[in-house]
Amino acid sequence: MQPLIHYGVWYKDDNNAINNIRITKQGSTYGNPSPAFIDVNSNINTLGVDTLTNPVCQANIINFTDAFTQLKTNSTNLTLCQSNTETWADGAKVTDISGKNLLLRDAAGATGPRIWNVTGTQLNHHQ
């Protein structure tokens, strides 16, 4: 692990196997990062990096507190987007998604990214 200010970069997983590079809070492990982590979808062999040669992170380059605050703000802003999809089940448009096999379709005139507004409670009914 490469120490940073309050953060660590994992070039190998907890079993010393080459895996995706992971950035965690200092004191977290690769397999149990808390409270959040960044997973680089590549490994040391693919990128040609390690703790000494072209390290993934350098101190004072990214302010992680500000980065995660901005991520939270962006996520909250996404909740304000208007839905432009329709939820269908058994061949009919539905508003109650509980316990149904669902199909999402574009709403009439939908353009741009597809947005489906659904609550956590509604999704939890499909576990």
Image: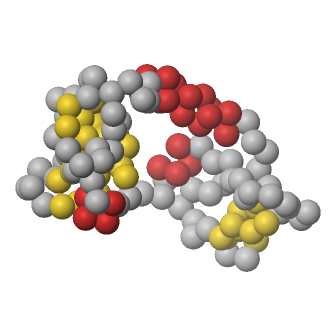
Q: Nearer the viewer, residue 19 or 93?
A: 19
As drawn, is 59 to the left or to the right of 73?
A: left
Q: x%, y% of residue 105? A: 75, 68
Q: Is residue 69 above or below residue 46?
A: above
Furthest residue toward right: 109
Pinpoint residue 91: horizontal percent, then vertical percent: 73, 77
Q: Eyeballing the image, is 91 above or below 38?
A: below
Whether residue 22 can be seen here: no
Residue in the picture at 85% in, 60% down: 111
Residue 56 shown left or right of residue 97 in the figure: left
Query: Residue at coordinates 53% horizontally, 61% vertically from top-left?
Result: 99
Single out the residue that lies furthest toward the bottom. Answer: 91
Q: Nearer the viewer, residue 80 or 18?
A: 18
Q: Residue furthest left?
A: 15
Asked whether residue 16 appears in the rendered view, the answer is: yes
Query: At 17% from the left edge and 29% from the top edge, which residue is drawn?
Result: 27
Residue 5, position in %: x, y?
28, 23
Q: Is residue 26 left or right of residue 67?
A: left
Q: Quadrant of residue 33?
A: top left
